[in-house]
Amino acid sequence: MNESGELERGWQPSFDDLGRNLIDTTFVVLDLETTGGSPKDCAITEIGAVKVRGGEVIGEFQTLINPGGPIPAFITVLTGITDAMVISAPPIGEALFSLYEFLGSPEETVLVAHNAPFDVGFLKAASEKLGSPWPRYQVIDTARITRYVVNRDEVRDFKLSTLATFFGAQTNPEHRALADARATVDVLHGVIERLGSFGVTTLEDLKGFTNRVTEAQRRKRHFAEGLPNVPGVYIFKDQSGEPLYIGTTRNLRNRVRSYFTAAETRKRIHDMIALAERVEVIETPTIIEAEIRELRLIMQKRPRFNRRSRFQEKAIWVKLTDESYPRLTQVKGAATLSDEIGWSGPFNGRDEADRAIEALHDVFPIRQCKPRITLTSMKHASACALLDLGKCGAPCVGMQSLDSYSSITSEIRFAMLSDAREMLNELNKRMTTLSLQERFEEAAEVRNRLGAYIRGSSRGERIRSLTKVEEILTLIRSGKTIELVMIRYGRLAATLTAPAENLASAISAISISSEVVEDDGTVLPASSHEEVEVLLRYLERDNVELLEVKGQWARAVFGAGYARSQLEDLKALAQRNRYKEDFASSFERSRQR
C-alpha cells in the first residue's frame, strides 16, 4: 500500500510467475511397443496414448505400425503383436503425423511415460529419419519420480506392473501400448496425490522434484576437489571411517564429482552422501586393476550401500558328496569343491541349483536320500519309491553294489566336468516326447531344468579354464603407451603401463613384481569367482594380445559350453522358421483379401 493507504496497482503476478497448476495441466501419457531395445536398429510396432487433465481422461489414441521388417519371436511372445497384425498397419510416418495432432502444442501438452527415455528416444529417432524436427515437449518420467515418493519397503521394484498394483490401477499392464498407457495414468495420479504432502502443486514443482540437488550434495561437493584424472577406486566413508560405498572408474575426479550433481538421482546414494564424511581414493595404472581392487574391497569391507559382490563366498554350487555312495547337494562357496569329486556352478540362487540337480536326477539313477549309507544303516533302511520308478538302484538297502554305484557317479562326474552331450540328448528326447503327448507344462519344466544346469555348468567351465593356468601375460597397445596384465591361477597378479618403446623392460619388470600365487588344488585357488569372470571378460576383448601362457588354457570340447551353443543354435533356427511361417501366412491372407 502507498502512503495514502490505497492499494498499489503497478504489479500483478502472471500465471507464469505463479507456475502452472497441476490440475490445469494437460498430460499425455504414452507407451510404445517396439521390435527391440535400441532405436538405431529397431522399430516401433504400436503407439498408445491417453490425454488427461484435472484427473479426467479427455481422449485416447492407439495405432499399430508396420515396422518394415519381421517382428522377433520373443517380442511376439511378450506383446502378442504378430507380423500378420501389422502388415496392413500404417507406416511410421503416417502414425507420427496422427500422434502429433493428438498431442497438440508443446506449450500446452506435457508428455508422461514410464521409463520415458526409451519411448521418447524411439519417437525422436523416428522423427529424425523422416526429416521432421522433434517438438520440444516437456517430459515427466514416472519410473524416475516414483523412486522418490515410494519406499523400498512398500514395493519390491519399480516396474510398471508393480506400481500399477500398488496404486490400484484399473488397468493391468500387459505389454500392449494403450493398456500400459492407461495403467501409467493411474500411477501418475497416485504420484501426484502423494506429492501433495511435499508441497508439490505446480508443473514446475513436479519437474524440479527429481532434479533437486540435496543439501548434503551441495555441502559436500568439495570431496571431489583435488582428485586426479586417473583410473582407480573411490571409497565413501562415514564419521567412524567405515566404508559406506566403494566404486571404480576410469576418471576419479569426474566420477566422484558426478555424485554431487542433479544427474545423481538414486535415493540410496543420496542417503549415502548424507552419511559420508570423506572420500578416499586408490589410484591404479589400469582400469582392470581398479575393477579387481573394487571387488576385493567390497568382499572384505562389505559396505552397506553396495548391492553386489558383498557376499561372493555365499555363491551356490552343486557337487557330489565325498562318501562311499555320493549324492548331489548344494553348497555355499567353492572351498570344498574338487575335480575328483565333481561339481558345477556357481548358480544364480538356490532355485537354479535345485533345477540343475533335478536335471541330473532325470538322467542318472543316483540316490536322492540324505542319510550316509553304511553296513549298519542297510540293515534298518527300506527302499523308497525311486526304486520302483527305475531312478535309483537302492544302495541304501544293499541292492546295488559299490562298484555298480561308482560307475554311475563316474558318469555324472564326467558329464559335469567333461562331456554334457548325454545330458543334452536325453533331456531333449524327453522334451520331444512330452510335447508330442501334448504335456507342454512338463516339457517346459524339463526345459527349465536343462537350462539351469547348462547356465551354471558352462559358467563353472569357463572359470575352471582360467584357474588352472599357471600364468598369462597380456598386452594392450594404445598409441604410444602399452598396458601389461599378469594373471596367475585366475588371480590378477599385477598390471603396468609404460611407453611402447620400452616393451621388453616392461615385461621384465612385471614378471619380477607380480604377486606370487600358488595352486592349492581347489577350484578357486587364489581368488573369487567374480574376479575370475571379470578377468575372462577382459581377456575376450578384441584389443588384448596374449604374450605368454604358462600351462594349459583349455575347455572341454563337448562340455556345458558346447551344450549352451547347441541350444542357442536351435533357438535361432526356431526363430528363423517362425519368421518364414509368419510372413508366408501374412502374405497369403493379404493376397486373399
Image: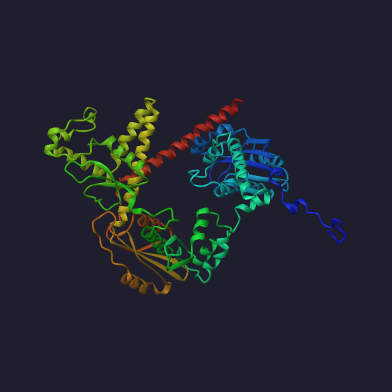
Residue 428 location, quadrant: top left
Q: Position of residue 136 (x, y in %)?
A: 69, 50
Residue in the picture at 51% in, 37% down: 78
Q: Position of residue 587 (x, y in %)?
A: 57, 30
Q: Return the residue nearer the eye: 402 or 485.
A: 402
Q: Position of residue 358 (x, y in %)?
A: 30, 37
Q: Position of residue 205 (x, y in %)?
A: 66, 51
Q: Return the residue nearer the eye: 220 or 376.
A: 220
Image side of residue 342 versus residue 158, left or right: left
Task: Give the quarter of the figure containing the C terminus.
Answer: top right
Task: Give the quarter of the figure containing the N terminus.
Answer: bottom right
The answer to whether one can see residue 418 in this image is no
- In the rendered image, the vertical position of residue 275 relative to residue 383, given as above or below: below
Residue in the picture at 23% in, 30% down: 386
- In the rendered image, the vertical position of residue 282 relative to residue 145, given as above or below: below
Q: Return the residue nearer the eye: 495 or 306.
A: 306
The answer to whether one can see residue 89 in this image is yes
Residue 512 location, quadrant: bottom left
Image side of residue 248 versus residue 64, left or right: left
Residue in the picture at 58% in, 61% down: 215
Protein image colouring: rainbow
